[in-house]
Amino acid sequence: MRVHLSEDGHLRIDMNSSEITEDIKQTLFAYEDQYFYYHFGINPFSLLRAIWFNLRNKRVIGASTLTMQVARMMHHKPRTIPNKLIEMFMALQLEYHYNKEQILQIYLNNTPYGGNIEGFASAAFAYFSQPVASLSIAQIAYLVSIPKDPNRNRPKDMQRVQKLKNRVLMRMHSSGLLTAELYKRAINETIIAKRRELPHSIPHLSAKLKGGGRIITTIDSTLQRAIEELVKEGAKRLNSLQIYNGAAIVIDNTTMEILAYVASQDFADKKHAGEVDGIASLHSPGSTLKPFVYAKALEGGLITPLKKLYDISLYIEGYKPLNYSEQFLGEVTAREALQLSLNIPAVELDRLLGDNSLYSLLKKAQIASINRSKSYYGSSLTLGGCGITLQNLAELFASFGNNGVYQKADYLKDRNKTKGIKLLSLESTYLINQILVDAPRQLFSSSWEYLADIPKVAFKTGTSANARDMLTVGYTPEYTVAVWYGNFDGKVGKSRTAEGKKEHRLTGLEASSPTMMDIFALLKPKEWFIKPKTIKKQKICQDPIEIGECRERVWDEVIEGVDSVTPCSLLRAEILSTLFDSHRISSMEELSAHSCYDSWREYKPLITSPIDGEKLIKNRLLPQEYKKTKLQCYAFENNSTIIWLIDDKAPFYGVSGKATYHYLPVGKHQIRCLDQGAKMREISVELEEL
């Protein structure tokens, strides 16, 4: 992937003893020290021969053994007679403390090869872009020749490269180390040696991997390159809508190894901050966390897949979540609610889970970005009201592929894996997997055309407010894939108009799902989840809460040993008011036989019109009669009479659920509704006339 220079700016790639081939040894010994295995650090015959030659000739030859050259490399002192004597003494010491193979390895890993290149493997990499095991005899011969005069012999002039190579080969041939055929082939081989650019692939990840020695990653380089192209293509597809950045990560669920780490659409894209790591950056998860809420609700007996939930407007301490469509569907099955990614049922279930909520699950998984109190996030957490990294999100979804066990993913081979944490049960993950893989395609959007003929994948999409973050996370038993598109600078992209639809911003389904599915097409997953024996078919009452006799019973898949639980708070004030409006019930007395009756009667009145904090605007030219404000309040007492109190004016009576109209002058007003049990609800509104 990448080679980092040492702190002093050198390229050093170490070889271990097993990488030093016989070809390297024979070539090196023939050229530098043919009696390496026979001397004790100093070769007295070579020394005498050098002295005799140097006394009689102007040209000087050396008598250094490989061991003496290692000694010289340790101190780099000038070549004087005293220093030569020191070098010889140190060679004796080296021979005493190390065996021949160790000395050979030290030499090959430290000898200079020109410029900032040190070591035989470094030179093979820099000049030939090859590991030492792939070098030819001719290439080895040239590399062996360089240390004689490193800066002069490094590859600048190809004629000199061939000359140096041939000089070494001739010496090998004359020593009987090469057959005539091998010698002829090597002599005729024209080698291309030049200083090559060091690799700089997967830059976001490789920047994290520093330190001496080799670092082996889990990255599948072929898959990585293919996904880099897919993410780049996906970003280009969205450029017209002013969306420029993308990221994707692939995890092997079995080993929790990261197989691909594409942190941006292009590291070199400085115009759009391509150097930002989109996998390690925080994103709003949108609706992607909802499956974990449903899984916990399945385990707690709050739902089964076909149990119905209420999709009705909800007010929680001033927070009013809406569905993406800004419409409410009334009663829907839990399966439909998750497949359609409805907001209200998810928020409702998370509220009912109490101490087993999504917040608790994320804290148990030790998600670092969840670092505030539960009250800080409130109900918005379920809808993406937090920041989470793409890697953390992928790790969470990998737990669905691993029967509910959560584990951190890693990009390093053979690093001790973190211990798994049991987040979800085997049964709840299976049921969620079946829901997410069977999402009815026709109910999503026209963009589903991109996903035709897809492999069997369970997935969830997410879109943050104003579509700043568009995500899709998919998984099978074998793999988890998370894809994100957006802008690193947080800017909102343009809206688009699909055929026959009103203008809208992109969603995770439209932006990220095509890339996610293309990645799974590369992965070719083969396995699917096996149904646990503890999942049973059983008839259930579909009613969200049974009032009187069950309206409809259906066969459903349930978790063996988990009893159905229906908290009284499921039938909140907003739902009770809807039951009154739909004439399902006509008075609270009809609920008197229910075990939750006393709890429901404790509800404060619910003012449904006007809305708390609303600013009402009237036309000042209209008569006062046409500028009245609708007042509507529901009380949950047997007596349906209510009392309205507006500011400090005299009270007046009304009927629970029945609208009345009252003129409010310009300004701020306090409106209170009082029931016959002396419980009161108060709201504030402001009226303006234009």
Image (cartoon, rainbow, N blue to C red):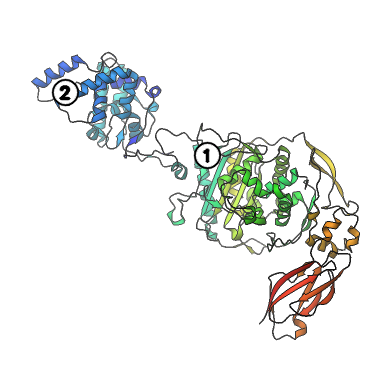
Evaluate whether residue 54 shows in this view. Answer: yes
Nearer the observer, 216 or 545: 545
- Asked if residue 406 is positioned above or below residue 43 in the image, the reply reads below
Circle nearer the N terminus (1, 2): 2
Where, by quadrant of the figure, is residue 259 drawn? top right
- Asked if residue 561 is positioned above or below residue 136 in the image, the reply reads below
- Asked if residue 620 is positioned above or below residue 183 in the image, the reply reads below
Q: Residue 139 carries which label?
A: none
Using residue 649 as the reference point, say whether residue 521 is left or right of it.
Answer: left
Q: What residue type is labelled 1?
A: Leu
Q: Residue 223 carries which label?
A: 1
Helix, strand or loop at label 2? It is loop
Percent x, y for residue 503? Answer: 63, 64
Task: Please report the residue visible at 62 percent of the width from the left and 56 percent of the height from the top.
Answer: 376
Q: In which quarter of the image is the N terminus?
A: top left
Mark 1 crowd level (few <14, some 14–19, many ≥20, 10 Å Cα): some
Q: Quadrant of the C terminus?
A: bottom right
Residue on which disc 2 sits: 61
Helix, strand or loop at label 1? It is helix
Using residue 535 as the reference point, say whether residue 115 is left or right of it.
Answer: left
